[in-house]
Image (cartoon, helix red, strand yellow):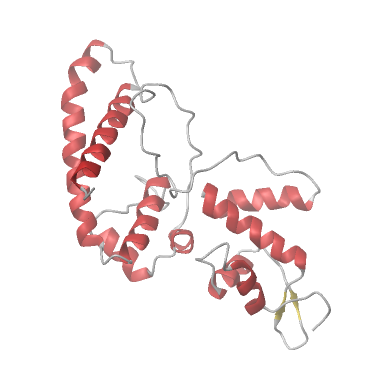
Amino acid sequence: MALGLRSIGQVLAILKPEFEDISISKIRFLESEGLISPERAPSGYRRYAESDIERLRYILDVQKNHYLPLKVIREHLDLMDRGQEPPALGNSHSGGPGEAADPDPTVASQPRPPKRAIRVTRRELLELSGLSEPALAELEKHQLVVPRRGTIYYGRDALTVAVISRKLAAFGMDARHLRVVKQAAEREVGLIEQAIAPHLRRNPSNRTLPAEVMQLVLHAHAAVMRSQLPQ
């Protein structure tokens, strides 16, 4: 092996401590999408230079912390290949894609900058979330994960549910348990719609009211759940 080049197994060992969901199949998936292009030895085995590893690290970081679809990541990499800086993405929290931090009731009514919209294919959703095909099919069966209306693409909320579902599986919770969460959410949405209906009739142009009330209900929901846990 040429000096400084590593095998795919060695690359996996280097990146695994930072990105626990990384796998050989995911590295190969990113290569098949044209995001990385490792050298090929005469035997056909992949050989990764340090620049390939750093490129992989960038891809995995923006997927993990900013949940960018592959199309946007590809645009960033094209800029980097031309010697330009990719767009600044700002700080991210560690909660997971689309997860809101525990809302503070003192700021719930303040406007928030819109989140970057994401649009991923089913294949990308599986890769980004780490879900298996049967697990995703089960979530879709209970309509916990659905494509955007009128499209075949999935958005931020679908990705959030998929990631959380994979993490909850470690505690023995599956789509059947999440269906209970969905039912509770539907009841809360009905409560919010009933409460704000008179206010919207008086001021139909107030587009932020549903989100403001939802933040307050989310805060109450989280506080009540915490109060039920053993102290």
* Above or below, comparing residue 123 to residue 230 in the picture: below
Question: For this rendering, which residue is in front, 125 or 168?
Answer: 168
- What residue sits 19% from the left and 21% below the top? 197
Left or right of 184? Residue 9 is right
In this orientation, which residue lies closer to the viewer: 208 or 93? 93
The reply to whether residue 103 is visible in this rendering is yes
- Residue projecting furthest to the front: 231
- Residue furthest bottom as drawn: 43
Vertical arrangement, residue 62 with respect to residue 106, above or below: below
Q: Residue 228: which quarter of the image?
A: top left
Write the residue at 76% across / 83% down: 41
Q: Position of residue 147 (x, y in %)?
A: 36, 51
106 or 48, which lies in front?
Answer: 106
Question: On the rendered image, what quadrant is the N terminus found in?
Answer: bottom right
Q: How many marks?
A: 0
Which quadrant of the structure image shows residue 166?
Answer: bottom left
Residue 98 point in image, percent of width and height: 42, 44
Picture coordinates of residue 224 (x, y %)?
Answer: 21, 39
Q: Residue at x 58, y 62 (%)?
A: 18
**Residue 68 shows in the view:** no
Q: Residue at x 15, y 26 (%)?
A: 194
Question: In the picture provided, is 123 more to the left or to the right than 141?
Answer: right
Of 79 and 49, nearer the camera is 49
Q: Position of residue 93 (x, y in %)?
A: 49, 44
Task: Reply above or below: 169 against 97.
Answer: below
Q: Residue furthest right?
A: 3
